[in-house]
Image (tube, rainbow, N blue to C red):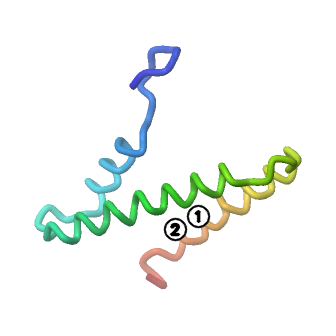
């Protein structure tokens, strides 16, 4: 897909393909690939749900605080990968 500038627009699928290529071994069983893809899209759906179900009357500042907290939660998780899980 392209945006109005003619540049390729990233999609969940394009991000999934990059992720899968980086972390799923080529010899992984089909069930592992299937479960990882389901988990990936479940996470994406959860994040989308968090963004689209914010209260309508939330201020821009409060929205930014929520988004910042979500970003920090993701960063905290990534910093623990390989250590805690």
Q: What is the crowding at mark 1: few (fewer than 14 residues within 10 Å), some, or many (at least 20)?
A: few
The CA distance from mark 1 to mark 2 is 6 Å
Position of residue 33 relative to residue 4, above or below, is below
Q: Residue at x 52, y 76 (%)?
A: 80
> Toward which corner of the image does residue 74 lie, by quadrant?
bottom right
Q: Is residue 43 above or below residue 14?
A: below
Contact (CB < 8 A) between labels 1 and 2?
yes
- Foreground: 79 or 48? 48
53 or 32, nearer to the observer = 53
Residue that mark 1 sits on: 74
On the image, which quarter does residue 36 sit in?
Answer: bottom left
Which residue: 43% across, 21% down? 2
Q: Which mark is residue 17?
A: none
For the N terminus, give its image quadrant. Answer: top left
Q: Secondary structure at mark 1?
A: helix
Asked which quadrant contains residue 50, the reply is bottom right
Measured as percent of width and height from the top left, residue 28 is found at 16, 69
Residue at disc 2, secondary structure? helix
Q: Is residue 65 left or right of residue 79?
A: right
Q: Which residue is mark 2?
A: 78
Residue 38 is situated, as x and y percent measured from the top left of the image, at: 34, 63
């Amino acid at each position: 897909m392209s945006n109005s500038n003619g540049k390729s627009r990233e999609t969940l699928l394009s991000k999934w393909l990059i992720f899968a290529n980086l972390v799923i071994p080529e010899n992984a069983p089909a069930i592992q690939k299937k479960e990882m893809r389901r988990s990936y899209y479940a996470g994406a759906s959860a994040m989308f749900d968090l963004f689209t179900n914010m209260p309508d009357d939330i201020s821009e500042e409060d929205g930014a605080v929520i988004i910042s907290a979500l970003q920090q939660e993701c960063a905290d998780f990534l910093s623990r990968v390989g250590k805690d899980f």
